[in-house]
Amino acid sequence: MERMNVVIVGHVDHGKSTFTGRLLADTGSLPEGKLDQVQAWCAINSRPFEYAFLLDALKDEQAQGVTIDAARCFFKSDKRHYIIIDAPGHIEFLKNMITGAARAEAAILLIDAHEGVQENSRRHGYMLSMLGIKQVAVLINKMDLANFDEAVFNRIKDDYSQFLTSVGVKPSAWVPVCARDGDNLISPSDRMPWYTGLDVLAVMDAFHKELPAENLPFRLPVQDVYKFTAQGDDRRIVAGTIISGTINEGDEVIFLPSEKRSKIAKIEGFNVDPRSSIGTDMATGFTLTTQIFVKPGEMMCKTGAANSHIGTQFKANIFWLGKTPLVLGKKYKLKLGSARVQMGVKEIINVLNAAELSSEHKAEVGRHEVAEVIFQTQKPIAFDTADEHPLTSRFVIVDGYEIAGGGIVVENRSNRTGYTARLEFDSDWQMTSIDTVKRAQRSGHSAAIAIVFGDHSKELSKAIEIALFDTKISAYRIGASSPLQWERLVEMAYILADSGQVVIAAIAGTAHDVVAVSDPLSRFSIIPIDSDHCNIDSALSAIRGRI
Amino acid sequence: MNHLDRLEAQSVYIFREAYRDFKQLGMLWSIGKDSTVLLWLARKAFFGHAPFPLIHIDTSYKIPEMIAYRNEKALEWNLNLIVGQNVDALANKQTYPDGAIDRIACCRALKADALKHTLDGTWPRWRLNHATRQLEPDTNPAAFTGVIVGARADEEGSRSKERYFSPRSQDHDWDVADQPPEFWNQYKTDFAPGTHVRIHPLLDWTELNIWEYIDRENIPIIDTYFAKPGGNQRYRSLGCFPCTTPVESPSQTVKEIIEELRSGKFANIAERSGRAQDKEDGGGLETLRREGYM
Ligand SMILES: Nc1nc2c(ncn2[C@@H]2O[C@H](COP(=O)(O)OP(=O)(O)OP(=O)(O)O)[C@@H](O)[C@H]2O)c(=O)[nH]1
Ligand SMILES: [Mg+2]
């Protein structure tokens, strides 16, 4: 039978846990004796019985009558199995609401008929849209406190549907309920004959399963590369979960950002029948036809298809949960797909209060705020934008040891065309009057720029500089691992080469970055050197052939 | 993909995240059906291998078949087995079966405390030597920073609020009121020195799913879960014999157990109803869980 995760959200005390508890009780989904046990507990502790106690299992929750963390419970209708995630409504526990909601395919949002739309009714609505949950049903609860009045129901519905429209959420149903007494939960209520729509259980059964991302381009974030030699296993297996698409043995693949290519040799597995093709959502692994060096964190795509972006700068919509605000000048860790990379904030474009939808310019993003931000990563990573591929546009931000925010990439802002700034000097800037040919005659070699890239660029570039210097070539090494520094590196390389040097410029980037860095330096001979695949001798002979 | 494929894929993903980020990783193995499924999923994730130690806390009151099964499978599957025990409490007869303390205090001493000190390496622990087939003192008692545990959300109240990656303080405390956010398959893999993280790959599985998967994958399970031919008693959940009673059930095969859970007499009875200690903590086990009980 099919299964579906549904999250229950809404403002504090609007009746989410009561609804969930009552639904479990009315559908006979509680373990035998559970209801009696909770009723007995209430009697002993002289507290009125609450259905919410069936869900609010933590001692602090029962003592304070508030849900702190989302509970998962299981129940089944005639149509499918449900995991119901009862989220907390208090703003203090927004991170727990998000944790619960992010697991869901559909949401039920409750509004208290007596209190009407409140701050977290709106904030939760906004978060649903941000988390990408498209199926939402709204329950107007505690209709008993509003005399079961249709006018109250309609007023709240009008008010809230305006808000939902503005954040792009379109509810599939609006149901008036009295959760505590079970009205309209699993059968029509005779206290509200004016309501002729579906009961909540029918509304839930009408939610449809999200289609797997089979039709989106193939994406597999490389989670790890295994070689269990100690256990006598010589396979080198690239492992990960397929986010979208399908792949077959023999398909040619490309890893981003390294842009290394290979072919799928075999789909590996334990205690499964051999297969030649595997699709979306499967956690799998492959051996490749060639022994290329790929690392965890790369994105595996198919060659010749629409592939992820590679970049170091992107614009994103984010929500912030951290105890300290998101600020400029601080280092954070980005986790996107399987990539983990250091990053900083380049610009905070605007900050929004998700409950009021009012935006303002601020220097930081505070707890529970949402914002539009430009990030700069320390190394190039692969990502997609939300409109192209929502699943691989999502990321989290780690501050210290904690996940402190989440976001969606909306635009690639990386400068891929090169660094032009400050190479054309001001008109009163005075340049050399000796031309490069004369300098080459004097030194016995012409100027050139060797761009050493890859993981071993630092060691290799140092060795090259010493070897060239020892053979009386005037060589000068510079290097920077962070793309933030590359603009400056380009400018220095330009001047050093102009003065007749053989410049060895080390960057910790990929072949892709070489293009960006070398573009404004095209006046000089550019010699790209891949430090992962090239030894000192071949590097030296490549340089000597060009100077 | 059917529901078991999905559960398996999610668990495998969690295993791989844990293995990537935790250098000192271990997995608790209670010998029961859940942790045996857990071990099977590890071998799925790592293509036939279990590339980290399996930790068993021996209360000395385990049903004897459990220890025999443990040793047999550890040798057969080439597992790196580590065993820990509260040696002092047992030597001084400070246990519930000795009449010295109540059930909750006994669980705390023989399970929670033993686990705590086995994980952080402050009490002696033993490692299986595959050459001699004997347990020998562990000479490398490093603290574990990541511990994989087979807890399921459907077991009891406080577990329904667990995280896949659940941080524990220096004292192994679980701060239920302030758990990390977890979304879009990104988990808490960064942690302060001295703290560790409990990892729960089975959180979304139900008891029924466990048996369905055992059936599909043909996983060898200890036979105390099955009734003897003609008998009408079996264990539904394995613990220490003084505190675990068998259930009345004639099920002799995995398929019969599945049927019993789907529509038979156990469809609406909680799995741990045979565990006496649960009832002494307001039904929640929360106190013990906060202190590190698995
Ligand atoms: N009159 C009336 N009271 C209700 C109804 N549903 C819930 N309540 C009461 O509203 C109060 C709050 O209910 P909960 O279910 O705990 O609310 P919640 O939305 O889960 O609250 P948090 O999880 O803390 O955000 C309880 O005292 C319930 O008895 C209803 O239909 N009518
Ligand atoms: Mg609640």
Image: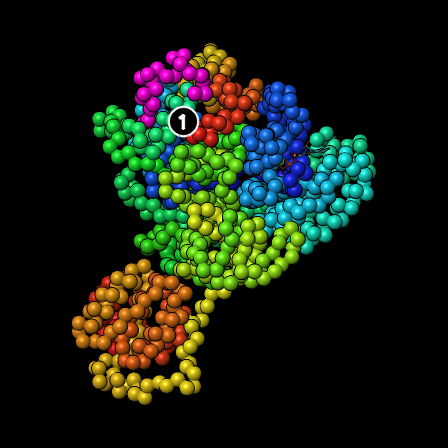
Name the residue at 65% across, 42% down: A10
Location of residue B71 with respect to B48 vertically, above or below: above
Residue B170 image position (x, y, % from top left)? 39, 36
Q: Can I make out residue A474 in this image?
A: yes
Residue A524 image position (x, y, % from top left)? 33, 78
Helix, strand or loop at label 1? It is helix
Location of residue A452 with respect to A104 vertically, above or below: below
Q: Nearer the viewer, residue A477 or B265?
A: A477
- Quadrant housing the N terminus of chain A: top right
Left or right: A540 in relation to A7: left
Residue B129: which quarter of the image?
top left
Disc 1 target residue? B112
Write down the chain letter for disc 1: B
Residue B273 within the magenta-colored segment of the rendering: no
Q: Which residues are magenta?
A: B82-105
Label 1 neighbour load within 10 Å: few <14, some 14-19, many 20+: many
